[in-house]
Amino acid sequence: MEIELLKDLIKDERGNYYTVVHRDGTEITLVNALAERSYAELLEFTDEFKKKYAEYEHQFIGKIAMDVLRHDIVFALKEDGHGRIHPLDAVMQQFRVTFVDMIEFYRNPQAWRGSHKPE
């Protein structure tokens, strides 16, 4: 099984999605995909932000990240090169899996991205 960092999604039996934020051989680190997407873009309430996200006015701020995740899921289901969805139980048979606690990811989400090992 090949897994692409920050692109493929891992789905558990309860319907939760995770993003692989680190891989070292057969060890991978997962974080909740909604939390990861919530920190993918810095939102500044400027005029440009208001124009870009006008359709979200008077809605919950989490809807932006959820819409990004929903988009990623829809395209991953098409299996056309926009990422894949792997079942967690199958992933755990092939990899040693570590989960990042969402509160730790919140403290420094950039520390979990890329090729360096989490501290």
Image (cartoon, rainbow, N blue to C red):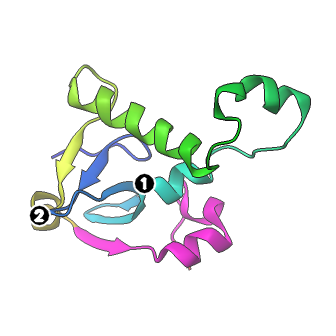
Mark 1 residue type = Ala
Mark 2 residue type = Asp
**Residue 89 numbered mark, or none:** 2
What's the residue at 62%, 53% (across, down)? 39
- CA neighbours of label 1 inside 10 A, class few (<14), some (14 to 19), many (20+): many
Q: In the rendered image, is residue 21 in sight?
A: no
Question: Bounds of the magenta span?
Answer: 96-117
Q: In the rendered image, is residue 96 in sight?
A: yes
Q: Secondary structure at mark 1?
A: helix
Could you say where residue 75 lies in the image, as x and y percent from the top left?
32, 26
Depth check, front residue: 88 or 44: 44
Q: Is residue 102 above or below residue 54?
A: below
Q: Is residue 76 above or below residue 37?
A: above
Tell whether position 88 is magenta: no
Dot 1 and dot 2 residues touching (CB under 8 Å): no
Residue reaching furthest to the top = 80
**Left or right for 83, reference 79:** right
Could you say where residue 61 lies in the image, as x and y percent from the top left?
64, 49
Tell whether position 104 is magenta: yes
Could you say where residue 46 lies in the image, as x and y percent from the top left?
89, 36
The answer to which image quadrant residue 100 occupies is bottom left
**Residue 72 numbered mark, or none:** none
What's the residue at 43%, 41% (across, down)? 69
- CA neighbours of label 2 inside 10 A, class few (<14), some (14 to 19), many (20+): few
**Left or right for 104, reference 50:** left
Marks 1 and 2, how far apart at CA: 17 Å
Residue linked to disc 1: 33
Depth check, front residue: 2 or 40: 40
Tell me which label, 1 or 2, sits earlier in the chain.
Answer: 1
